[in-house]
Image: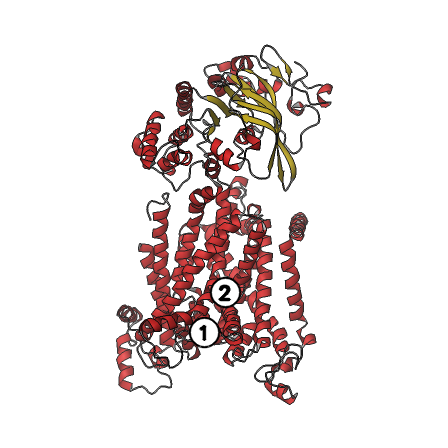
Amino acid sequence: MTSIAMQRRKATAGRVWRQFRSSRQGMIGLSVLAVFVIVALAAPLLADIRELNPVFARAQGNPQWASPDQFGPLGTDYIRRSVWAQFVWGSRVSLFVGLAATVLTIFIGSVVGIVSGFIGGKTDGALMRLTEWFLVIPFLPLAIVLASILGRSVWNIIFVIGITSWPSTARLVRAQVLTVKQRLFVDRARSLGAGGGHIVGHHILPNVSGLILANATLAVPISILTETSLSFLGLGDPGAASWGKTLEEAFVNGAMVRNAWWYFLPAGLGILAVVLAFTLIGRTLEEIANPRLSGR
Amino acid sequence: MAGSLLTLLFVLVFNFFLFRIVQKDPIGSLFRGRNVPQAVIDNLREAFGLDQPLLTQFFLYMRETFSLNFGVSYQSRQPVWDEIVAAIPATVALVGVSAILSAVIGTALGIVAAWRRNTWKDHGITSGTMLFYSMPDFWLGMILLVGLAVVVPLFPVGGIVDAGSTTTGLARLLEQTYHMALPAFTLTLAYLGEYTLVTRSSLLDVMGEDYLTVARAKGLRDKLVRNRHAVPNALLPVITLAAINFGFVLSGAIAVEAVFSWPGLGKATADAIRGPDLPMLQGLFLLFSAAVIFFNLVADLTYGFLDPRVEDI
Amino acid sequence: MTEPLLSMRDVSVTYHGSGGAVPAVRRVSLDLERGGSLGLAGESGCGKSTLANSILRLLPPDAVVEGQIVLDGKDVLSLRPGGLRAARWTAGAIVFQGALHALNPVQTVGRQIAEPMLIHGTVPDEEAAERRTVELLGRVGLPAARADSYPHQLSGGQRQRVLIAMALACEPMLLIADEPTTALDLMVQAQVLRLLEELKEEHDLTLLFITHDLSVLTYACRDLAVMYAGRIVEDGPSWEVFGGPAHPYTKGLAAAFPTIGDPSSRMAPSGLGGDPPMPGSLPVGCPFNPRCPYATEACLEAEPELRIAGTDRRAACILV
């Protein structure tokens, strides 16, 4: 039976991929994302990590506030560090935080949504109340407060984003679970004596996974933008230079008044490109999962 | 209504525990490393009842909260509430203006995009707004600041008035407006994408409805079909979005206010983070949450007023 | 012989969507005399609503209409936008299906009834429009207070009456009733039918009645045209067509709607098995051949044209 299920899953994946490939916006998003993933993975080949260390930069004799034509390819900052190195290594942190926070968001949201929708009754009522409450609390201030209390580290940022952005996923998943459940009663899977775990694993999860995937792709931009804002406000990990951290340092150290555009443009463009890429991919996946949306 | 009160209660409880999770002695840590008379600390300890059982502590916390006593800011040594009240007008002016402008412009763009679906107008509007929607708002602010205040010095680089300015009356108002232009422009661009996308998709939903065919059959001009029949129906979700966004007026511009040194609640938050000035953060968080809850309630009420199908809330 | 109020010549409607060209209506010709009544019958998807909407050019932009439609002496397909708007609701008005969202949910029904009068200037001012709205509501059997109601506050039957009142607002010559009794319960259906019949007499209306229910048409219309796969396959006087169908499809359709009070027709198996063909992929030959109990080899060869099947009667079947 597993082989049949596997084949079916493979066929579904193949169908989704064929539809995805025919979407122009989806392929543009995927290509842009691929470039950044390659940059992040190949960071050690593209820039020496020691370039991020001001002591090393000084020892190398780097100039201060050098523009790109004085020091390639992207100039230097106020403490002589290569901006290119910061961009390359920053892509790692930004992508990692964005993805990890999304995984946590989707995990919490899916668990709450599935439990709520599947069990129903009082559990559903209580969980949905909680979800509504979390939806109301202003997201960025809550993240700021939590990050302030917990301290500045990559893992805390991931935790903070996860704990603050799960409610919309939970709602979406719950709605989908309810529809699937309705269908299941028609299929009479229950009356055949199947246990709750079996139903969730074999009927509900496969049916909501497409939606969860689309939702996850659309949650990554929010995670990345939140990380950027938190880092910009000084809540970023001092030991892991994300793009947001680069923007903060550029801002705090007067890059704008000096018109040191090479310092704050690359990181922002990187964020813009990655966010746009995920948005385009997410919208395409959403259209495939929900054909009614196509042409939007 | 009852739901809103319950939500407010939740936020208060949440806040109560939030600021006590990591701190065994909130009052002590309030004054960590500060030169504050022991008598003041003891007074506050007693006011918050930290020697009392948890439930009593909670009631004391509620009492202090409702009498707007959030403690004393580390940075200014002034009561948190006074600091907050002083920063409210600047934020309301800046974010209020931006919120209204973005709602109006964004909705108008969304209407044009949907009504002319798949034309170059639609593609231009959709991709343009998606672009602004995808960038960090403060980064957009940085670019506009460098472009329009540093490289081409059309606008001031920050603050609400020039340093050392002594203007009064109308002249001061004009000076403030001039200083507000760039941050307001930034926020408007950053916010309008959401309105455009929501309006567009909502109007596209409505455009399939039969009553539009009926309106056309009656001999109405295309413009009248759109403005009288399609838009009023498509606007319901947009109005909800606007009301909810207005709830974020107070907390919406933290990073952008920081970029433009705009002396509002956002900059106060950004400054409090550097401390961290926990009493200030706690007060700001409660205020931000209360604003959101209030405007959610307003959203529900407006919805009931605008959509005749919703009769009771 | 006077000129007919509505004359359609070789009208074809093709949708050019993402799935290629889909012919919804194929070379339909029909005439409707002033004061006459024609019923258009067929299963859903046969093109009857598309045909009705083409008369006032209400089809979506991806629909291409060919042929000639003359309504009250005006060549509808060549009218400029201004002329088209002027003709809409005055030369011909439509009674839309009340079960659909034909009424704007956020406007009172009174405003929606008054709207076309103010657009076309058939009343001098808003006050007159209001008076006439109340009058129209009274005529369709609704109290004046209903003008201030919103659509969701009305029952299905009341909504249908509102749509009828709305269609009469500018005293049109042609009334197109598009499934006005669908989704109403039987008693309300009968009331609505009686009302339409009365109004037709009072206002000397010309009626084009569209439904899938052949028995309703027989009751309401003098003439009948049956559509299948975008074409008219049979037409003639109602009672004759219903009583003695010439086309096998009409036979099946007539059997599908039992005559009330006749137990034998209730027990008889419906003559229509299977589903109507998709307009995008019609069968070779006569499009009805896969479902036709009388189909022969010859039916696979060519699509039959309409041929004479008695006095004033035509049918598109080689067996006629």
Residue in front for this viewpoint, A174 or B264: B264
- Could you tell whether B56 is left or right of B245 in the image? left
Circle 2 marks a residue in which chain?
A: A
Q: Give the amino acid type for the residue marked by disc 2 in the picture.
A: Gly
Residue identified by numbered label 2 = A162
Could you say where residue A58 lies in the image, as x and y percent from the top left?
Answer: 62, 88
- Could you tell whether A131 is left or right of C279 in the image? left
Q: Are marks 1 and 2 on the same chain?
A: no
Q: Residues within 10 Å of mark 1 (few under 14, many from 20)?
A: many
Residue C126 is labelled as none
| C-alpha separation, residue under disc 1 versus residue under disc 2 | 30 Å
Could you say where residue B92 lies in the image, as x and y percent from the top left?
Answer: 36, 66
Q: Give the amino acid type for the residue marked by disc 1 in the picture.
A: Phe
**Residue C161 versus residue A11 in the image, above or below:** above
Residue identified by numbered label 1 = B260
Question: Which scheme is used to colour this image of the protein?
Answer: secondary structure
Residue in front for this viewpoint, C113 or A210: C113
For marks 1 and 2, give the one nearer the viewer: 1
Regarding mark 2 in the picture, which secondary structure is present there? Answer: helix
Regarding mark 1 in the picture, which secondary structure is present there? Answer: loop
Is residue A201 visible in the rendered image? The answer is no
Is residue C280 visible in the rendered image? The answer is yes
Tag 1 and tag 2, C-beta contact below 8 Å = no
**Residue B293 versus residue A146 in the image, above or below:** above
